[in-house]
Image (cartoon, rainbow, N blue to C red):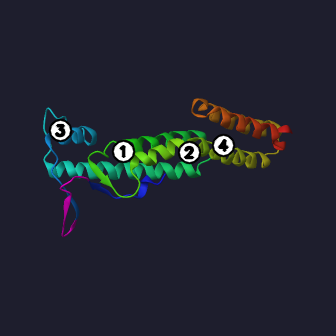
Amino acid sequence: MSLFNKTPQNSGESGGKKQKGNAFVPRDFDREERIALQKMVTTVPIARKMLPQQLLIKAVVDFIGRNVRMGASAANVVNTTVYPQLFFVNLQLVEDCTRRVSLLEPYWRFEGKQPSEQLGEIIEKKHDIVGAFIERSFFFTIDKLKKKRLSSSKRKVFDEYQFSLLKFKDFIDEENQSFFAELCENCEELKQ
């Protein structure tokens, strides 16, 4: 999830010019490119108003920045949370933000890995990401169980965790479901 540290730049054969005080001035977009970009990055309908070049560039930069910030925040949650709802909602947000930025690739130049490559990596590693979350959240729940005295309160805590995790069963592949079942079977704390 390394999309969230790249600097956007515009692409084009004519390139762009560096100006004092400005990072990058992109080439002029033709009418079709401007229409496509405006549809992607703004809510201003084309039939109403076509944005001037400079406003469109600012809108693209803002769009990329907003998605990068949201994606970075979501990636942090994905990597640290032990709560299923937070995890799965933010994992989807990471994918969505990366996908939105990758749609700009034909019009914009990015340094380092392209957003579409990073999206492919996220999708490819999703199994491992979900598996790591299951393990992390399971052992966090087991630590909570160890602090409980009554078996009924232990059962309640685990049932709540299991229910919240299984609400997202459609997002968990069979191998990770089997991994979760194996963790449950082998846990001494649950056998008491």
Horizontally, residue 86 falls left or right of residue 72, namely right
The magenta stretch spans which residues? Answer: 11-22
Do the residues bearing badges 3 and 2 touch, measured as CB atoms within 8 Å? no
Q: Which mark is residue 32?
A: 3
Which numbered disc flags the more N-terminal residue, 1 or 4? 1
Which numbered disc flags the more N-terminal residue, 2 or 4? 2
Q: Which mark is residue 134?
A: 4
Q: Residues within 10 Å of mark 1 (few under 14, many from 20)?
A: many
Residues 125 and 172: in front is 125
The amino acid pointed to by label 3 is Glu
The question of residue 184 being in magenta is answered with no
Which numbered disc flags the more N-terminal residue, 3 or 2? 3
Q: Looking at the rendering, which quadrant does residue 187 occupy?
A: top right
- The picture places residue 1, in percent across and down from the top left corner, at 49, 51
Q: Residues within 10 Å of mark 4 (few under 14, many from 20)?
A: many
Residue 83 seen in the current view? no
> At x 63% / y 35%, what residue is drawn?
164
- The picture places residue 116, in percent across and down from the top left corner, at 40, 45
Horizontally, residue 7 falls left or right of residue 18, namely right
